[in-house]
Amino acid sequence: MTQSTSVSKGGRVSRKAKKNPDGTMSIVDHLRELRTRLLRALAAIAVTTIIGFIWYEHGIPAWAIGPLHVPRLPSLGEILKEPYCSLPPSARATFSADNECRLLATSPFEMFMLRMKMGGLAGLVMACPIWLIEIWRFITPGLLKNERRWTLSVGTIAGFLFVLGVVAAYLVLPMGLDVLLHLGDSTQISALTGEKYFNFVIALILVFGLSFEVPLFTAMLNLAGVVHYEQLKDKRRIMIVVIFIFAAIATPGQDPISMLVLALTLVVLMELALQFTRIHDRRAARHVSEWEGLSDDEASPLKVAPSSIPAAESIYDGDHKGIAGGGDARPAGGSGPIPKPSLVTAPSGAPSVSEPPTPTPSPAPSDASPASGSRHAPPAAVLRRGPRSWNDSTGDNDSKPGQDTIQSSSFDDVL
């Protein structure tokens, strides 16, 4: 990624980043993009935190547009304290003159800090689509097409399971509080402070939400080839015991209702994950190669066993004649030299192949000397076989390829 510098009308220098054609980025460019993504996410969280701070005390009134009627949305404080206020008055203390259900505050800044804390958590949840999109856009350029598909699918399933856990925790909360606050109601009465109560609610929501991700984590390990169905099937009873122990420790209230709901829900989800691993392993077994799992120096099994090589067959029959029954037979007894095969006559119309003629030796030169005035004898004709023949007078090619030609040459060339 490169930068282009331009000067605006006010004299300010603006730098705009240009993307490289190949999509590569330097470390500085990555840090700049990370800063941009973080600023956008923090800005969205800040806006939604302000909305959550206001929503903590004030609900959204009911409104209607034509035939559409939207009921009043309770405030965030009313939604969170509803499980506690649903308990009978005998199980909780009432300090207001109008007998309205309220939580107790034991310090001057407790109510303000609690409102800031709950408003920030609400803003983080409300802004999750924005900061999740920013994270997705930051990591997407480094992923392949199939990795993007798997990441998007896993993220969607993880979000759905977390929301399912939050809903389950909110439904379990009144039952858990009812059991806990009635254990010693004959001698005590509960007066929960806002900080302790909201910490209990948030802890329960996080425990349920994160616990519901365990089956998805198991399925991801199976897709990666770390665990298989046969391994998990043999340890099913051990896994159920571990789930109940985890539910007893992880639930903040330590009540049996929350523990049973969390444990039974996790057992059902884990069983669904086991069935997913069984189906995936069965499908993967159909495409397993024969050499998979073998070491480099171990031979893979063959589909077909090698057959024995048959004995060699003789090319002569019982009468020592050729296979076609023609031609001269070998000498009696099968011994002696094989007769020389006769020449094969070419079929009619086929070009005949003959041996090249033997060159005629050139006659010896005469004994007459140049001094006697006699002339040399004319050069003899020498038979040569070649693809071309050149006329000495015109230089034209008078022969055809593969044709025997006679070229004239002097005795010096011949000798």
Image: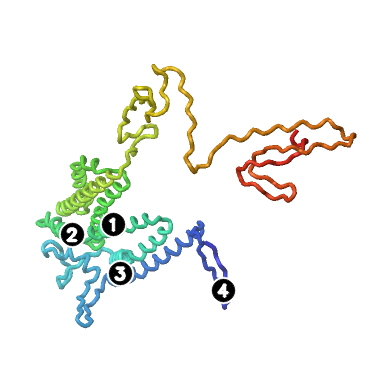
Callout in the foreground (3, 1): 1
Q: Nearer the viewer, residue 146 or 388?
A: 388
What is the distance, in whole Å, between disc 2 and disc 4 at their CAs? 59 Å
Tell whether label 2 touches label 3 (CB within 8 Å): no
Q: Residues within 10 Å of mark 2 (few under 14, many from 20)?
A: many
Q: Which mark is residue 52?
A: 3
- The disc, 4 or 1, on the residue closer to the chain's N-terminal end is 4
- The answer to whether residue 108 of the structure is visible from this angle is no
Of callouts 3 and 1, the N-terminal one: 3
Residue 158: assigned label = 1
Return the residue at label 2: 173
Q: Residue at x 13, y 56 (%)?
A: 179
Q: Which residue does the image show at 48% across and 35% down from the upper left?
A: 345
- Report x, y in % for residue 88: 11, 64
- In the image, taking residue 86 as reference, residue 107 lies left or right, namely right
Does dot 3 land on a helix, a strand or a loop?
Answer: helix
Q: Quick one: label 3 or label 2, which is nearer the N terminus?
A: 3
Labelled disc at residue 12? 4
